């Protein structure tokens, strides 16, 4: 991983990775197809359709009714005892149970086919760019995707300017992607925090539908898969393998309580990091400066790869805290001096 500061200072971020550790890059169309096939092979029934609404039960133990459409039929319904809503940031399941709103960012990216020699540069490299030219509150990226790269950015504050930020990331990476052909354009909403309600009745929300995307890194795929598995396991346990009806208390106990105990502090910590380091170009310069420190890299990757806050030594943590303060002061001072020169 290589990180570029607003002034284009580059830091390689991965010196402490062990031989068996890496940052995975994937294509969602491949992963999603694999997961569907695996579910079917395990006994699930795959129905290709679009959920339009969810009718709530008329009594305590009566079923939920999922209404959906398919390519061949405009109206279909399915009666079920339990619903796990994994239908994304614009979840209709969440809307049906009045789960509340959340703030969403927008992520925009272009998939670009490069020549073989340019693609070779990204064979074992992903790039992150930060600066208010590419995003006022997030980062931009060039991520390898097997035979092409994804070039994109995201923002919460200035969604209407997303194409301006996209042009900026293309300009900053131009020497490495010049001549590439855009083969696909994608835009997706990204939840900024968990929904106010994630369990209601016999309905549970997971993944983006629940708001499980971390600040600072934008990590969501792992937490989507993990929350789905934890919720599914909770349903099986509470229902005693499908032999008894479950209720809201069961889902709260077996799924939500376990999830919050395991991950809520990670989400809060990354929220704090984003507020500290993504607020100005000076603080972004400080972030990149800190990323050159091997202790910072080790703690970051231990937390990222294993999805729990890594524990460091007290003396090293104190040094890191003082170094962080120093970097923020130094970079803010440089930024102030540069503004004075410009004026």
Image (cartoon, grey):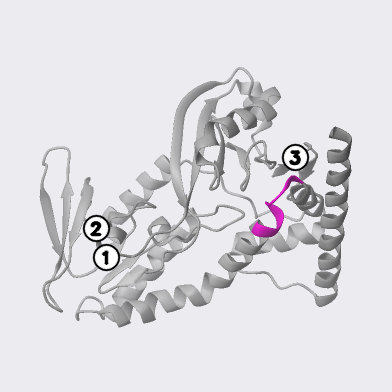
Of 162 and 41, nearer the camera is 162
* Residue located farthest toward the front when viewing the structure as drawn: 343
Which of the labelled discs sits on residue 245, or is there none?
none
Question: Is 172 situated above or below 219?
Answer: above
| Residue 301, picture quadrant | bottom right
**In the image, 269: left or right of 329?**
left
Give the spatial CA distance, label 1 vs label 3: 43 Å
Q: Residue at x 55, y 42 (%)?
A: 158
Task: Residue at 80% x, 39% y: name it.
Answer: 9
Instruction: Give the percent coordinates (x, y) of residue 311.
Output: 71, 73
Eye-nearest disc, 2 or 1: 1
In the image as oriented, which residue stretches furthest toward the top? Answer: 179
- Mark 1 lies on residue: 97
Q: Is residue 60 above or below residue 150?
A: below
In magenta segment, residue 3 = no
Q: Position of residue 148 (x, y in %)?
A: 54, 29
Badge 3 or badge 2: first in the primary sequence: 3
The residue carrying mark 2 is 44
How far apart marks 3 and 2 lie (CA) works out to 48 Å
Q: Residues within 10 Å of mark 1 (few under 14, many from 20)?
A: some
Res 133 → quadrant: top right
To which residue does mark 3 refer?
6
Q: Decide: marks 3, 2 in contact (CB < 8 A)?
A: no
Q: Position of residue 97 (x, y in %)?
A: 27, 65
Local packing at callout 3 (Cα closer than 10 Å; few below 14, some 14-19, many 20+) is: many
* Residue segment shown in magenta: 275-281
Sequence-first disc among 1 and 3: 3
Residue 4: name its quadrant.
top right
Q: From the image, which quarter does the N terminus lie in? A: top right
Q: Position of residue 244 (x, y in %)?
A: 19, 81
Residue at 25%, 61% in the rendered image: 96
């Amino acid at each position: 991983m290589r990180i570029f500061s607003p002034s284009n200072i580059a830091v390689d971020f991965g010196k402490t990775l062990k031989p068996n550790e890496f940052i995975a890059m994937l294509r969602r169309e491949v992963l999603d197809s694999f997961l569907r096939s695996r579910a079917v092979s395990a006994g699930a029934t795959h129905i290709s359709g679009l959920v339009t609404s969810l009718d709530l039960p008329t009594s305590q133990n009566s079923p939920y009714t999922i209404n959906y459409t398919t390519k061949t039929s405009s109206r279909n319904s399915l009666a079920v005892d339990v619903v796990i809503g994994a239908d994304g940031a614009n979840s209709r399941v969440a809307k049906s149970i009045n789960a509340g709103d959340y703030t969403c960012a927008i992520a925009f990216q272009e998939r670009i086919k490069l020549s073989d020699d340019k693609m070779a540069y990204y064979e074992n490299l992903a790039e992150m760019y930060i600066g208010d030219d590419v995003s006022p509150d997030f980062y931009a990226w060039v991520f390898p995707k097997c035979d092409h790269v994804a070039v994109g950015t995201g923002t919460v504050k200035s969604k209407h300017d997303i194409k301006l930020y996209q042009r900026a990331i293309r300009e900053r990476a131009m020497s490495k992607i010049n001549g590439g052909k855009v083969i696909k354009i994608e835009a997706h909403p990204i939840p900024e925090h968990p929904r106010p309600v994630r369990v209601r009745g016999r309905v549970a929300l997971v993944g983006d539908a629940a708001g499980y995307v971390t600040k600072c890194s934008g990590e969501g795929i792992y937490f989507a898969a993990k929350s789905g598995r934890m919720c599914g396991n909770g349903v099986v346990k509470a229902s005693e393998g499908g032999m008894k009806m479950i209720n809201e208390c069961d889902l709260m106990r077996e799924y939500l309580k376990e999830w919050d105990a395991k991950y809520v502090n990670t989400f809060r910590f990354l929220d704090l990091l984003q507020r500290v380091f993504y607020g100005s170009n000076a603080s972004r310069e400080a972030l990149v400066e800190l990323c050159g420190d091997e202790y910072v890299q080790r703690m970051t990757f231990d937390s990222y790869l294993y999805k729990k806050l890594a524990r460091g030594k007290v003396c090293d943590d104190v040094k890191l805290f003082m170094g962080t303060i120093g970097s923020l002061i130094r970079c803010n001072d440089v930024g102030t001096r540069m503004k004075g020169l410009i004026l």
